[in-house]
Image (spheres, rainbow, N blue to C red):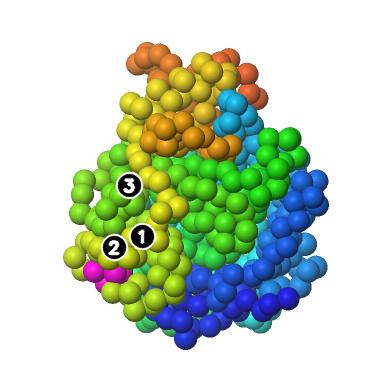
Amino acid sequence: MTQIFYNSTRNNQIKVSAAEAIVRGIAEDGGLFVPSQMPTINLDWEILKDASYQDVACLVLSAFFTDFTQDEIKECVNNAYDAKFDTLDIAPIRSIDNNTYLLELFHGNTIAFKDMALSILPYLMTIAAKKLELKEEIVILTATSGDTGKAALAGFANVTNTKIIVFYPEDGVSEIQKLQMVTQVGNNTKVIAVKGNFDDAQSMVKSIFSDTQLKADLLTKGYRLSSANSINIGRLIPQIIYYIYAYAQLIKCGKIVAADKIDIVVPTGNFGNILAAYLAKQLGLPVRKFVCASNQNNVLVDFFNNGIYDRRRPFYLTNSPSMDILISSNLERLLYFITNRNVEKIKLWMEELQEKGYYQLSDEDKNQLVEFYSNDADDNETGKAIQEVYTNAKEVIDPHTAVAYSVYKKYLEHQKGESLPTVIAATASPYKFPKSVMSSFAEIEGNTSESDLIDQLHQRSQVKIPDAIKDIFEMPIIHQDVVEISNMKQAVIGFLS
Ligand SMILES: *Cc1c(COP(=O)(O)O)cnc(C)c1O
């Protein structure tokens, strides 16, 4: 098997093992780790169509994390994808019309797609730390737009030799998302609200990671910082699994035969989920188009349409808060691949983004983006999509999935009817956003509580209320800290002393 190393998107001379890339989270030059080459995986669909999720997971992860033994990978996979998920399929597909399937990525602990990778990351990280014979405790530092926070907390709570600190935008998450985080138990956990948006928090976390003085100070105290955001390669690679699994399921149910092309639609924020689909194609998954769906924060739509990434624009709080992002970190990895690993270009673009707020691709580089289609949906269109899917298929979808559905409809119009079997990434359970979901069906009376809305949602969808939120209104609030963005670093130091 080919040995895979990890380079930085900003320096091809940096070359580390998977274990090191996972523990470090981000390269020391601020770049993101990327595989030194694409592994070859034998995608034998005759076998894969009957393979379990865990089988597909072992296949993908062992091809990328070549410094892990088969037994180590298997242990991680079996610990991660177990009865925490409320379905044996782990990530089932569900048909909503003749050609369209939801890929349900919300059957884990915290009912959002972040569980798909964050269920396994703590196991990968613990084994990686052992391999590298690290003595220090690992401190996971995470900025969240709503869902990563809780999924990372659930994954790392009470994991020995780790601590986890989560920063979330005080006014930028749903009521349920917030409750899920602030009620988190576990001695090694800390949740802090910040006065700012996700981009502010993510930028500050990245700058803490590149603060060499702070890192050195923490090392002498026995702490090593790492990341659970999708900048960590240990999150990105596990997300490839479900696209391959979904394709195998489409074969199994007779919708397609091997080598048939499909379209994939992804509601996008930090560009991690859709990038995993792109990597799946590099491994041989037959995909025609990647449909990149944005909400009103449509910086990516402009990027795919005119080749200019420009973050100088208003930031909107929308009904799909996990996509309220203007700086999509993982796009840096796509740029690296489409420029054929041209680190000089990447460095320049990232400097321009930092200093001027925008960068522009050449026509030649922009032509490499033809596999992507991108469009946006606002809150009003999102609500309509929730209604439409309910009317047609009796499925209640969440607002993020609804953004994807709405953009998919625009894509079909653009394609003029040439529709292929399509997989839409369904990224959260509607129970995480009862207010937005129920207000798409009818105006909500002023005094209706969140828990009443959950009951109404239950009556409409007939889907069991997930354990993840059943008792959430009765649980004690444990985390109450609020800090300014400029005090985040101090808060980290404070928690660790
Ligand atoms: C994180 C998230 C997204 C965006 O995914 P990215 O990988 O950041 O593009 C979409 N929907 C939900 C529900 C999420 O939690």
Q: Is residue 186 positioned above or below 105 on the image?
A: below
Q: Main secondary structure of the magenta part?
A: helix
Q: Are marks 3 and 1 in contact (CB under 8 Å)?
A: no
Q: Residues within 10 Å of mark 3 (few under 14, many from 20)?
A: many
Would you say residue 195 is visible in this rendering? no
- Picture layout, residue 426 above or below residue 496: above
Query: Which is nearer the eye, 20 or 351?
Result: 351
From the image, which quarter does the N terminus lie in? bottom right
| Residue marked by disc 2 | 363
Instruction: Give the CA separation, mark 3 to mark 2.
Output: 17 Å
List the residue tagged with mark 3: 301
Q: Residue furthest bottom?
A: 13
Mark in the foreground, 3 or 2? 2
Element under disc 1: helix
Name the residue at 69% across, 64% down. 41
Task: Give the amino acid type for the residue marked by disc 3 in the picture.
Answer: Val
Q: Crowdedness of circle 1 by 10 Å Cα count: few (<14), some, many (20+)?
A: few
Q: Secondary structure at mark 3?
A: helix
Instruction: For the residues labelled 2 and 1, say whether their Cβ atoms are less than 8 Å apart.
Output: yes
Specify the quadrant of the image occupied by residue 56: bottom right
Residue in the image at 48% along x and 48% along y? 290
Q: Secondary structure at mark 2?
A: helix
For the residues labelled 2 and 1, the Cα–Cα distance comes to 6 Å
Q: Identify which amino acid the numbered label 2 is placed on.
A: Asp
Residue that label 1 marks = 367
Horizontally, residue 245 falls left or right of residue 49, namely: left
Closer to the camera in the image, 198 or 52: 52
Q: Answer with the quarter of the image where residue 492 lies.
A: bottom left
Residue 150, given in percent of the width and then of the height, sits at 53, 47
Which portion, as a residue range, is magenta? 349-354
Give the image location of residue 52, x and y in percent: 78, 48
Instruction: Point out the tag, 3 or 2, that comes first from the N-terminus.
Output: 3
